[in-house]
């Protein structure tokens, strides 16, 4: 099946595939990923390939969207991910983003999230997005508020040790 891809001013967003295993292996083992998202015990490209197959592709196949790999248009570098996730225990879809350290603080997460917010309504008929972050993740909080998300409260996910801030936006 062919899935939708999108371009923003500086990025190409395409669904993450098993071909991204090496990139995903590096991304999920960055200090910020481990601190703010959690250790996924991905210790090799093979583990990343399995993770993509078990955790990312099923939603893509079911809904036509999920995790997108962010590719910089200027040099085709894979710089991060952004996606809309059908997360159990939430009302609607959860938007999330992560970048390799070399690409942080350059507006890429904002650009990718804005594009996915736009297409979530126009292409996928999603009317509400949520986002979750730890109370100490200042950069994520700042970005969510810049994007127009409002705090709705806190939430405890069964597998998370920390209470998370719950943000939401109605599109």
Image (cartoon, grey):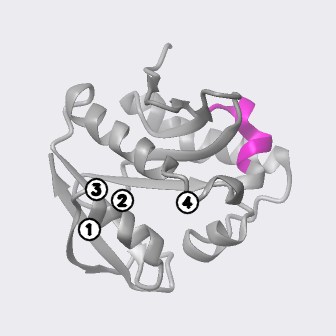
Task: Tell me the SS state at disc 1.
Answer: strand
| Residue under label 4 | 105
| Residue under label 1 | 167
Residue 93 vertical placement versus 2 (above, below): below
**Mark sitting earlier along the chain (4/2):** 2
| Residue under label 2 | 88
Q: Image point 41% across, 72% down: which residue?
A: 133
Task: Tell me the SS state at disc 3.
Answer: loop
Q: Nearer the viewer, mark 2 or mark 3?
A: 3
Where is residue 117 shown, x and y percent of the image?
29, 42
**Mark sitting earlier along the chain (2/3):** 2
Q: Is residue 104 left or right of residue 167?
A: right
Where is residue 120 shown, x and y percent of the image?
27, 36
What span is colored magenta in the figure? 17-24
Q: Is residue 114 left or right of residue 99?
A: left
Where is residue 45 shown, x and y percent of the image?
83, 46
Q: Nearer the viewer, mark 1 or mark 3?
A: 3
Q: Tell me the tag on residue 147.
A: 3
């Amino acid at each position: 099946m062919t899935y939708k891809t999108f371009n923003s001013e500086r990025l190409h967003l395409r669904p993450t595939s098993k071909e991204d295993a090496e990139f995903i292996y590096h991304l999920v083992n960055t200090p910020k990923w481990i601190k703010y998202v959690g250790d996924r015990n991905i210790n090799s490209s093979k583990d990343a390939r399995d993770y993509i197959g078990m955790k990312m592709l099923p939603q893509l196949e079911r809904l036509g969207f999920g995790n997108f790999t962010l590719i910089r248009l200027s040099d085709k570098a894979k710089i991060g991910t952004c996606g809309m996730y059908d997360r159990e225990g939430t009302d609607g879809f959860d938007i999330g983003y992560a970048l390799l350290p070399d690409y942080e603080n350059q507006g890429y997460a904002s650009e990718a999230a804005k594009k996915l917010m736009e297409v979530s309504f126009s292409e996928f008929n999603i009317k509400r997005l949520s986002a979750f972050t730890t109370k100490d993740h200042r950069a994520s909080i700042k970005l969510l508020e810049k994007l127009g998300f409002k705090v709705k409260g806190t939430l405890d996910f069964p597998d998370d040790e920390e209470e998370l801030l719950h943000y939401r936006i109605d599109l």
